[in-house]
Image: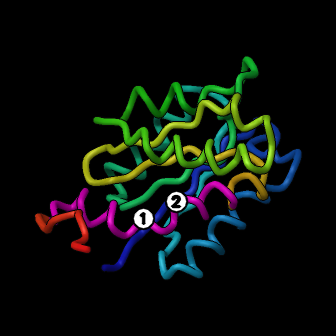
Amino acid sequence: MNMRAGIITVSDRAAQGLRADASGPALAKMLADASIETARTVIVADEKKDIMKAIRELADSEKLDLILTTGGTGISPRDVTPDATLEVIDKQVPGMAEVMRHQSLKITPHAMISRAVAGIRGNCLIINLPGSPKGATENLAALMPALRHAFEKIKGDPSECAVSP
C-alpha cells in the first residue's frame, strides 16, 4: 500500500522565518525510511484557525493518508494544536496518544504534560507530535509498528485484527 503523508510544523518563530524547522525534516526522513512519501510540508503559526485550515487542506484537498503535526502540544498559552485537531477530526484514536505519553515518560517526566491527540478525518490519520526533533521522532517511532495496520483499517480492510496463537 502506497502511503502519502503531510507534515505541519506549528511554530510562531518558524512561520516568521526566525528559526529553521528541524522537526519537519527529521519526520520526513523517518517516513522515507518506512517507505511513506512526504507529499507536502507546511509551516504555520501557533494559531488555531491556521492549524485547522492546514489540516483540512491536506486531508480533504490533498487526500493524504497521514498528517503529522509537530509543535504546540504542551500547556503554554500558545499551545493549541490539540484543540485545533479535535475540532476537525471525525473521531479520536486515544490509544496512539496514550502510547506516545507512555513511551515518553520512560525518557522524561515532562511527557505527562503533553496534550497530543490522534484522530481520523475522512480517510486520513492525524497525529500530534512534540515540537522538538528528538521528541517528535521518538513519539513517531513508538507508533510506527501500528501505522500500516491503522491505514488498512481506516481504508476499510475487513480482515480480523486478532492474531491466532
Residue found 57% across the figure and 56% down from its top: 7
Return the residue found at the far right. Answer: 18
Q: Is residue 72 above or below residue 37?
A: above
Does 142 lie within the magenta span?
yes
CA gap between label 1 and label 2 equals 6 Å
Q: Position of residue 70 (x, y in %)?
A: 65, 48
Residue found 73% across the figure and 40% down from its top: 11
Residue found 66% across the figure and 74% down from its top: 29
Q: Quadrant of residue 74?
A: top right
Q: Amino acid at mark 1?
A: Leu
Return the residue found at the far left. Answer: 158
Q: Position of residue 129 (x, y in %)?
A: 62, 47
Does 28 sit left or right of 89 as displayed? right
- Element under disc 1: helix
Q: Residues within 10 Å of mark 1 (few under 14, many from 20)?
A: some
The residue under label 1 is 147
The residue under label 2 is 143
The reply to whether dot 1 and dot 2 touch (C-beta < 8 Å) is yes
- Element under disc 2: helix
Does 121 sit left or right of 68 as displayed? left
Q: Quadrant of residue 66?
A: bottom left
Q: Amino acid at mark 2?
A: Leu
**Quadrant location, the N terminus:** bottom left
Region rendered in magenta: 138-157
